[in-house]
């Protein structure tokens, strides 16, 4: 997700992410140290690593993910399709546990305790004050934040197509619906008495004002002036 948001942001400014800059991968926990050492000029990572760099005086935040795609997705819980079919009860128990945990984390009164837990060395290993400072605008649960909405998968696939990482013949809508199993989420949510998420076929909130429609994902990928489409 970070890679495609970074590419989107750079391309919006006319910077080719494959030719004008070099994008490398490193552990988020090492980003501030690498920035301080001059090993990289900038980084894209989830909090609290941005806050760590600012706190250490080695960097500043140029743009936040929500400024590129408001309410865009972040992490996912994914399993192999074969495992999901063999272990449906275990999968549902895991989904229910994740939904309960997300609801707990969403409650403002629980944020200090959440930060304390995450600060433990076996988890994030960063001071609780820095973690808590980054949790203010984070949504973990409400408004169907946990739902695997296929339109979000479709946008990611459209960016893969845009940069020549998948061929143009790929049926993005079909792949998105097969990968993001909304039915499994709805089963777990119903068991907890939660309402099903609203049907979403269009994604907005992008920094360039564009709208993404799942059924016209390929045309969306082709609509950018800065792109690298693959044949096929």
Image (cartoon, helix red, strand yellow):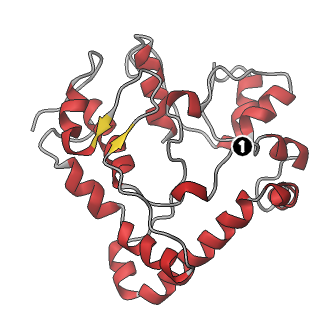
Q: Is residue 114 visible?
A: no
Above or below, 150 against 17 in this view is below
Count all numbered tags in the image, as a single digit: 1
Instruction: Give me the residue at 53% from left, 35% from top.
Output: 70
Q: Is residue 21 visible?
A: yes
Residue 140 appears left or right of 202 = right
Quadrant of the frame with the C terminus: top left
Residue 147 appears left or right of 168 = right
- Judging from the image, what secondary structure is the residue with disc 1 in? helix
Above or below, 42 against 182 in this view is above
- Image coordinates of residue 115 in percent, x first then y, are 83, 54
Above or below, 25 against 192 in this view is above
Farthest residue toward the top? 14
Residue designated by label 1: 29
- Image coordinates of residue 136 in percent, x first then y, are 76, 43
Label 1: few (<14), some or many (≥20) within 10 Å?
Answer: some
Q: Quadrant of residue 81?
A: bottom left
Instruction: Give me the residue at 19% from left, 36% from top.
Output: 218
């Amino acid at each position: 997700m970070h890679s495609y948001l970074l590419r989107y942001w750079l391309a919006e400014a006319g910077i080719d992410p494959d030719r004008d800059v070099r994008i490398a991968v490193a552990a988020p926990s090492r980003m501030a140290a690498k920035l301080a050492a001059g090993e990289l000029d900038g980084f894209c990572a989830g909090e609290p690593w941005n806050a760590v760099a600012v706190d250490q005086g080695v960097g500043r935040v140029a743009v936040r993910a929500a400024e590129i795609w408001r309410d865009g997705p972040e992490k996912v819980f994914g399993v192999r399709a074969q495992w999901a079919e063999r272990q449906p009860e275990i999968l549902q128990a895991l989904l229910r546990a994740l939904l309960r945990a997300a609801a707990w984390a969403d409650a403002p009164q629980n944020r200090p305790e959440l930060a304390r837990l995450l600060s433990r060395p076996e988890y994030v290993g960063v001071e609780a004050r820095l973690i808590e400072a980054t949790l203010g605008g984070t949504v973990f649960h409400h408004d169907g934040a946990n739902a695997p909405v296929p339109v979000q998968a479709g946008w990611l696939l459209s960016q893969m197509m845009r940069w020549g990482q998948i061929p143009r013949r790929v049926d993005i809508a079909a792949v998105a619906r097969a990968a993001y199993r909304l039915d499994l989420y709805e089963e777990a949510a119903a068991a907890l008495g939660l309402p099903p998420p609203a049907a979403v076929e269009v994604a907005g909130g992008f920094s360039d004002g564009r709208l993404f429609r799942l059924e016209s994902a390929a045309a969306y990928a082709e609509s950018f002036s800065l792109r690298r489409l693959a044949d096929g």
